[in-house]
Amino acid sequence: MTRAKRHLCVVGDSDTISRGSGFLAAWMGFLEQHADLRYPSLAEVYVDEQRG
């Protein structure tokens, strides 16, 4: 893996990532303050689940 020069997309559960290690917890804290975090709505999750 090389450093992201323009964009980095991480898909995962922020609570789970934060529990991984001290480094990951600090990284999630940084992201919450400085990054564009997007969370799916319950409707989006439910629709995807229904589609199979």
Image (cartoon, helix red, strand yellow):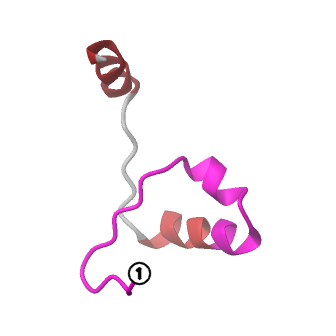
In percent of width and height, residue 18 lies at 66, 58
Quadrant including the C terminus = top left
Badge 1 is on which residue? 1
Vertical order, 3 against 33 (above or below): below
The magenta region covers 1-26
Task: Mark 1: give few (<14), some (14-19) or many (20+) Cα within 10 Å.
Answer: few
Secondary structure at badge 1 equals loop
Closer to us: 38 or 13: 13
In percent of width and height, residue 8 lies at 33, 71
Q: Residue at x 36, y 50 (%)?
A: 38
Q: Residue at x 64, y 68 (%)?
A: 24
Q: Residue at x 55, y 73 (%)?
A: 30
Vertical order, 3 against 22 (above or below): below
Q: Quadrant of residue 17?
A: bottom right
Q: Quadrant of residue 2?
A: bottom left
Q: Quadrant of residue 46?
A: top left
Q: Residue at x 54, y 47 (%)?
A: 13
> Is residue 18 inside the magenta stretch?
yes
Q: Disc 1 marks which amino acid? A: Met
In percent of width and height, residue 51 lies at 26, 16
Vertical order, 4 against 11 (above or below): below
